[in-house]
Image (cartoon, rainbow, N blue to C red):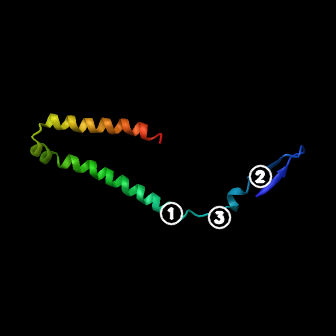
C-alpha cells in the first residue's frame, strides 16, 4: 500500500497497484456457501416441477377439479411472489 501526500499535507492511498499486490484467495467457507445456495436453488426448482407431475394424484385424492387445483397453484404463486418482494429487503 502506497501513501501519497498532497502539498497541503493531506495523505491519500494510491490504489494503482492495489489489485496486483493482492494475493488473497477465496476461502473454502465461501465455496461451501455457494454450494449450499446452488443446492437450495436446485431443490426449489425440483419441488415446483414435482408439483406439476403429481397434479393428477392430488386432484384425485382431494376431490378437486382442474380449475380448483389451478386456483390453489395460482394463489401459491401469487403469495410467493409478493413475499419475495418484501423478503428481498431483509
Task: Name the foreground residue: 55 vs 72.
Answer: 72
Q: In the visual, does 24 lie left or right of 89?
A: right
Dot 1 surroundings within 10 Å: few (below 14), some, or many (20 or more)? Answer: few
Q: Which mark is first along the chain, 2 or 3?
A: 2
Residue indicated by mark 2: 14
Left or right: residue 25 versus residue 34 is right
Q: Measuring 36% from the left and 35% from the top, which residue is drawn there?
A: 82
Q: Which residue was labeled with disc 1?
A: 29
Residue most extreme to the right: 7
x%, y% of residue 79? Answer: 32, 36
Q: Earlier in the sequence, mark 2 or mark 1?
A: 2
**On the picture, is 68 further left or further right than 89?**
left
N-terminal of the two: label 1 or label 3? 3
Question: Observer-nearest residue: 2 or 33?
Answer: 33
Residue extending farthest to the front is: 90
59 vs 4: above or below: above
Q: Residue at x 37, y 38 (%)?
A: 83
* SS at mark 3 in the image: loop
Q: CA distance from mark 2 to mark 1?
A: 31 Å
CA separation in Å, label 1 and label 3: 17 Å
Q: Which residue is mark 3?
A: 23
Amino acid at each position: 500500500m502506497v501513501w501519497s501526500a498532497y502539498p497541503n499535507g493531506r495523505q491519500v492511498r494510491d490504489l494503482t497497484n492495489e489489485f496486483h499486490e493482492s494475493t488473497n484467495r477465496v476461502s473454502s467457507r465461501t465455496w461451501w456457501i455457494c454450494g449450499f445456495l446452488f443446492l437450495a436453488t436446485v431443490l426449489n426448482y425440483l419441488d415446483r416441477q414435482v408439483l406439476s407431475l403429481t397434479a393428477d394424484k392430488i386432484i384425485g385424492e382431494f376431490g378437486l377439479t382442474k380449475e380448483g387445483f389451478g386456483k390453489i397453484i395460482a394463489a401459491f404463486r401469487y403469495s410467493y411472489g409478493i413475499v419475495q418482494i418484501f423478503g428481498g429487503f431483509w
